[in-house]
Amino acid sequence: MKLVVLPTEKLSGKIYLPASKSYSIRAFIIAACGGRSNIRRPSNCDDALVAMRTAQDLGAKVKEIRKHHWQVISQEAHSRSKTIRVGESGTVLRIVLPLLPIYFSSAKVSGKGTLKGRPNGFLIEALVRLGVKIKGTGKNHGIPITYSGGQLQAGIMKINGSISSQFISALLIAAPRLSGSSTIQLVGSKIVSSDYIQMTIQTQKLAGIRIVKKSERAYFVKGNQQYKGLKNFTVPSDYGLAAFHLAGAVLTQSTLILQGALDDRLLQADGHILPILKKMGIRFSKTSKSLHIKGPQAIKGGQFSLKTCPDLLPILVILAMFAKGTTRFYDIGHARVKESDRISDLRAELEKVGAVFKEKKNELTVIPQNQYHLQKKLNPHNDHRLAMAFAVLGLKVGCQIENIQCVNKSYPDFIKDFKFLKAKAQVVK
């Protein structure tokens, strides 16, 4: 399917923001690790549904007891062998790998689409050092991944955190189930997306697990801890998805109200969108239940590190195209190993509309132009965040976005909400 977006003068209206994909995934997997959990308003995106099925693969009973209210009851039953299908979810793939020796005597993890090109070598190598017989496909240990035996040993766990924090979250979730205590040591030139590590630890804490942060590169995990379940856990709304509508309001000088569960006690990496917008000169108001943005707005360029929030890059680049002054995004090298290469692929597509960039390995500078080309066909490279960013761009220049169904990975209601806010958009075959 394709989405045709026409230039739109004004957006207006009020929507309820979708739930956080990241917290939904963590909630279902952690709920499967022990206890009885109640999860309210989880995301209905493809990746969250994969996490729900994976919880069932780990033996949990998962049931919707009321609308938007799920009960998860963990089971200690183990299986000799299992095939786990994780769709296109990199988070579910990485988190489940250290759990395989705890639940199965052998297992195969498969996936599809963009997941095939995502690297898992650092995590696989760490698991092998810790006694697990596991192997992926190719030099980067892509899917399918096969586990053929061996137990995950407690102790010193060294893991490279320079390309993905998901490797660290994976070990953090498995380590409390081991018989001995562990210290997870983060190695590598830098640690990226560290806020996602804290999101994992916060969710574990709500389930009765204690993780001690010894330093920026070391976490102590006591063994033989019991997951006690998530009691009435409401999944917060997703700041990263809110960013697309906030940007749409800015580009069309519109007023929007975005409602949701915006509890700042639960950290979100993409929550950095708000201070970044402020630095770009964009005004808004926020409560624990809503975001209110009111036009007109002027966008200022600047310099922004996205080390902890690389998923914000696509939509921030769209805003930067219409800023007064250049904008430099740096610490973004890990954005190259997402669903797409979110630096080179984003640049190549936006150059079709006349955007001008300076690209380096770890940064991207946006040089605004007075005019852009209209009604171009843009390929999101099967990347949900590129697709939604291009839709927002279409509000200004019009465009046709290929393979728009890829937004289902994180935001299946995106097109419905986009049109409800009066965007001129239509799906065509």
Image: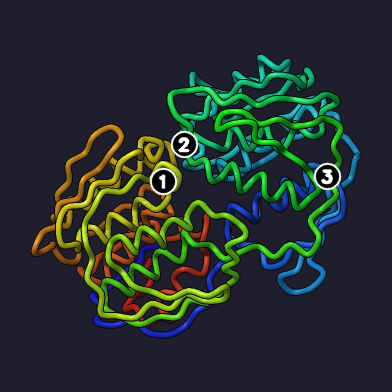
Q: Is residue 311 visible?
A: yes
Identify the residue under disc 1: 310
Q: Residue at x 91, y 39 (%)?
A: 77
Horizontal arrangement in the rendering, residue 117 relative to residue 228 (left or right):
left
Q: Nearer the viewer, residue 181 or 257?
A: 181
State the residue at coordinates (42%, 85%): 13
Q: Tell me the amino acid under the disc marked 2.
A: Val
> Horizontal and vertical percent for residue 59?
84, 44
Q: Position of residue 82 (x, y in %)?
A: 77, 34
Quick one: 130 or 394, which is closer to the camera?
130
Across and down, in percent, residue 407 comes to 46, 59
Q: Earlier in the sequence, mark 2 or mark 1?
A: 2
Q: As displayed, is residue 3 above or below residue 157?
A: below
Query: Which residue in the protein does label 3 denote?
Result: 227
Residue 141 visible (yes or no): no
Secondary structure found at label 3? loop
Tags 2 and 1 touching, CB below 8 Å: yes
Screen quadrant of the N terminus: bottom left
Mark 3 closeness class: few <14, some 14–19, many ≥20 residues within 10 Å: many
Q: Is residue 190 left or right of residue 233?
A: left
Q: Which mark is residue 192?
A: 2
Identify the coloring.
Answer: rainbow
Disc 1 versus disc 3: distance between alpha carbons? 30 Å
Of discs 2 and 1, which sits in the foreground?
Answer: 2
The quadrant in which residue 16 appears is: bottom right
Residue 293: x %, y % from top left: 38, 77
Depicted 3 relative to depicted 266: above or below: below
Three-letter amino acid code of the residue under disc 3? Tyr
Disc 1 marks a residue whose amino acid type is Pro
| Rendered view: 87 above or below 174 | below
Residue drawn at x 17%, y 46% as measured from the top left: 357
Q: Secondary structure at mark 2?
A: loop
